[in-house]
Amino acid sequence: MEARFRILLLTGLVALGGCAGLRGDETPMEDGETVAAAGDDSVITPEVERREVRPPKIDTENWEVGAYAGSLSVEDFEVNIVYGARLAYHISEDFFAEALYGTADAGISSYERLSGSAPLLTDSERKFKYWSVGFGWNVLPGEVFLGGTRAYNSAVYLTAGAGSTTFAGDDRFTVTLGAGARVLIKDWLAAHLDVRDHILEVDVVGTNKQTHNFEATVSLTGFF
């Protein structure tokens, strides 16, 4: 019985020694894989495909100038075509100052259409011309992705300004509030979509009232 116990004990020791020898023939690698230490020259290396990244090219100039066109709803005077020019100076990545000048021809008023009376305004008095100076805030700067390989820098912004509007034979103080989106097509060229509200007082029918004249435009601007 004692002889059998010694044989089992020796067999266990030999088995443990063999396992330790096998573990010693392998060398751990940094990425968790192992290769044979002797008699094997093969090395397993990870194959990582590197993606080519092109950093965006943004013009370092701060001045921006361009033209816009769209539609202007003059309160009580239909929706009309408007066009104008925009000049902006980018103070920082978040804020900019801008100046606007636009013009449109107001149509027939709802009073003239319903009453069938004589025209309330002459052709020259129907000219709706405005200028405004104000500031803008880039609320949501980011990127717009087209397809899977191209990204364009963009921003959603809010604007507020004040100026004057010439309409119905008089110059009227105007507050302009708006919002827009800008996308950089090139490092020097940008496309805009803007919505504005020109708030002013008008007394065409004899009573002075505050009017909201909404405008939607698209524009192209260049940096210089």
Image (cartoon, rainbow, N blue to C red):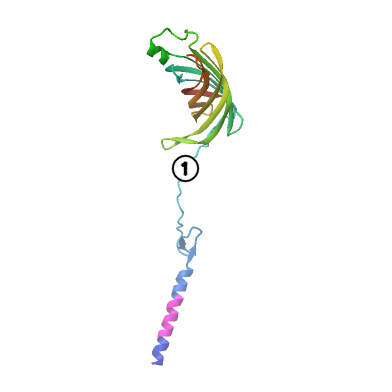
Residue 224 visible within the image = no
- Left/right of residue 49 with respect to residue 166 in the rendered view: left
Q: What segment carries the magenta color?
A: 8-17
Residue 94 visible within the image = yes
Judged from this view, the residue extending furthest toward the right is: 91
Residue at image coords 42%, 88%:
6
Quadrant location, the N terminus: bottom left
* Tag 1 residue: 51
Q: Based on the picture, tell me whether residue 138 belongs to the magenta stretch.
A: no
Residue 9, picture quadrant: bottom left
Is most of the magenta stretch helix, strand or loop?
A: helix
Amino acid, disc 1: Arg
Quadrant location, the C terminus: top right
Q: Based on the picture, tell me whether residue 16 belongs to the magenta stretch.
A: yes
Residue 161 drawn at (x, y percent): 57, 25
Which one is in front, 216 or 175?
A: 175
Which one is in front, 86 or 108?
A: 108
Residue 217 drawn at (x, y percent): 46, 23
Kind of element beneath mark 1: loop
Residue 14 drawn at (x, y percent): 44, 79
Q: Does residue 210 sit above or below 44 in this rendering?
A: above
Residue at image coords 49%, 25%:
196
Residue at image coords 54%, 29%:
159
| Count of all numbered marks drawn on residues in the image | 1
